[in-house]
Amino acid sequence: MDQFQAFIEKAKNDSGLMAKLDELGANDAKTDEIIKIAAEYGFTLTAADVDELRNTVKKGAELSEEELNGVSGGLPASGLTENRYDTTECAKIKEVQYRCVGFLAQFNCDHYAKHELKDGRFIQKCAMGCFYYYVDK
């Protein structure tokens, strides 16, 4: 996973790479496509690396109650985030979209939060008011 983390750090600072990842993510890229792009930038990823990350994404990120309460003013900058809010596009969505979580859920919008409740459900919330709903596990 170290290569993957280095690859993500590279993407964070390289707008060309980020554009390629956004395109891959928006088109639900296959594992071999992700590995190929990483190789073009000098990173060696395995199918197991990508699968591990996808499994992590499915489990969901957990926020503390304190972090969730802070969502009304925007998600605290923890990890890799960016403001993806677009008044035209976001107003049309009613649930989590690619723009909310980015490539393999590695580049969350600043306004997106997902929180696991004690009963096993998840709250998914946009601090800009686009959506707020519960999801069963």
Image: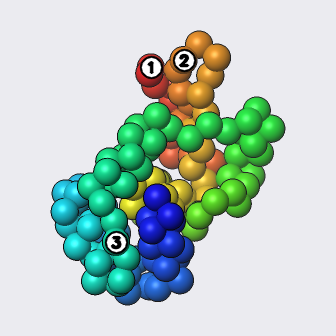
User: Which numbered disc, 1 or 3, marks the residue closer to the eye?
Assistant: 3
Q: Residue at x 44, y 85 (%)?
A: 15
Q: Nearer the viewer, residue 85 or 88?
A: 85
Of marks 1 and 2, the one in the foreground? 2
Where is residue 106 drawn, in percent x and y? 48, 58
Pointers 1 and 2 in contact (C-beta within 8 Å): yes
- State the count of labels: 3
Q: Quadrant of residue 132?
A: top right
Task: Estimate the spatial distance between the alpha carbons at disc 3 and disc 2, rounded to whole Å.
Answer: 36 Å
Task: Estimate the spatial distance between the alpha carbons at disc 1 and disc 3, rounded to whole Å.
Answer: 36 Å
Specify the amino acid type for callout 1. Answer: Asp
Q: Nearer the viewer, residue 99 or 56?
A: 56
Mark on residue 76? none
Mark found first going from the N terminus, 3 or 2: 3
In this view of the protein, can residue 102 be seen by the observer?
A: no
Asked if the residue at tag 2 contacts the one at tag 3, i.e. Cβ–Cβ closer than 8 Å, the answer is no
How packed is label 1: few (under 14 Cα within 10 Å), some, or many (20 or more)? few
**Residue at x 33% of width, y 54% of height:** 50
Q: Residues within 10 Å of mark 3 (few under 14, many from 20)?
A: some
Color encoding of the figure: rainbow
Residue beneath disc 1: 136
Q: On the rendered structure, is 24 left or right of 111?
A: left
Could you tell me which secondary element the residue under label 3 belongs to? loop
Q: Residue 98, relative to residue 61: is it above or below?
A: below
Of the residues under marks 1 and 3, which one precedes in the sequence? 3
* Front one among 132 and 104: 104
Q: CA distance from mark 1 to mark 2?
A: 7 Å
The numbered disc on residue 120 is 2
Asked which secondary structure carries label 1, the reply is loop
Q: Residue tagged by mark 3?
A: 44
Q: Indicate the position of residue 107 as horizontal and vertical percent values.
A: 50, 62
Amino acid carrying mark 2 in the image = Gly
